[in-house]
Image (spheres, rainbow, N blue to C red):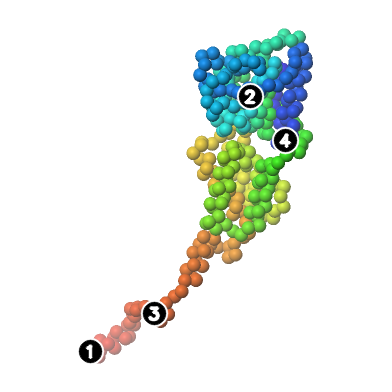
Amino acid sequence: MDALNLSWRGQPHSGKRTALHSALRRLAESRGVPFSIQTKQFFTGGVKADTTQISTTADDEGDEGGSDKDCFPYEFSYVHVGFDISRMSMQDKIYLKPILQRWSVGSQVLTGHQERASRILVFYHAHLFSTESYFLLHSLLENNFGDVSIWMTSELPVAERLADYFIEIPVAKTLVSSGPTWHQIFEKTLTTWSQKDYPKLSDTMAIRSFLYELLMRNLRWTDCVHYLLDVALSIPLDKSKRNKVLEILAKQEATAAGQTIPSYRIPLLWEALFLELREALSQPKVDGGLSSCIEDTRERSEGAPRAQGTKVATRQSKSKGAAHVSNGSHA
């Protein structure tokens, strides 16, 4: 089993990490080594000269050094080293490169009865990997085939570039999560929008504030679109509204695993998506013609007081017959 590259795939809070840890425990028992998960900080740019390896013991100094903003926690045991992609703050390609560079040093472990020395490299939330990260993983598997195994959890299928290397294990069990989830937040938002009138120009600021709150909490573009899709299919909506929402989500780009968009386009795509959804879910316009901002302008212009008794001088045109009579009188 430790010679395979495995991906546990399932919905959020379905128990993928628990299933992976159970497999690691069985692997440790088969190797005859104890299984205990411990945590340490990984620094991307340590200041010590000997910080070239990933720490594998609790009392090892390992990668101490560097600033707190350049580090994140990772877990390790005698049989694996694990990293959470969601903790990398949308910069997974920057963190993954030093991880793989240090992988070849200090990664030997007790072989046990199977006489196997490869450590399992674990990635949680692997569907958040960027395109560049998949290039790095592909290179690792090509150059170290048989010497390293990658296990990961994911909410999406393995990216096409790596699909031939992995075996997917479905996880269908649903666990109850404490506190509000992203699904509940989007369910409340879309339900509220479906009960509001057609948006006005002033509503764009509220929509922009909401989406930037999502960005501040490191919600990824891919996750956002899939949450919206799940909610659009589950909440009670008119058939016409649901079809509009599904059409909007279907045309969004870079929504599969291993796909990314340039950083400068992220706010533009988010704003365009949420504004389209807000208009599609809202109550229809009264006249079905002009947009709300134009209606507001027309209402203000119609409601403005007009001056009474004011006449505008206009130039009256004369007919040909009147002109002929006028010329004849002068004759």
Q: Residue at x 72, y 47 (%)?
A: 234
Q: Earlier in the sequence, mark 1 or mark 3?
A: 3
Please give the count of numbered marks on the rendered protein: 4
**Residue labelled with disc 2:** 74
**Residue labelled with disc 4:** 13
Q: CA distance from mark 1 to mark 3?
A: 36 Å
**Residue labelled with disc 3:** 310
Mark drawn on residue 287 = none
Q: Is residue 143 above or below residue 93?
A: above
> Which-is-in-front pick, marks 2 and 4?
2
Q: CA distance from mark 2 to mark 3?
A: 80 Å
Q: Nearer the viewer, residue 218 or 198?
A: 218
Q: Earlier in the sequence, mark 2 or mark 1?
A: 2
The kind of secondary structure element at disc 2 is strand
The kind of secondary structure element at disc 4 is loop
Q: Are marks 2 and 1 in contact (CB under 8 Å)?
A: no
Residue 194, image quadrant: bottom right
Query: What amino acid type should be assigned to the residue bearing mark 4?
Result: His
Viewer can see residue 1: no
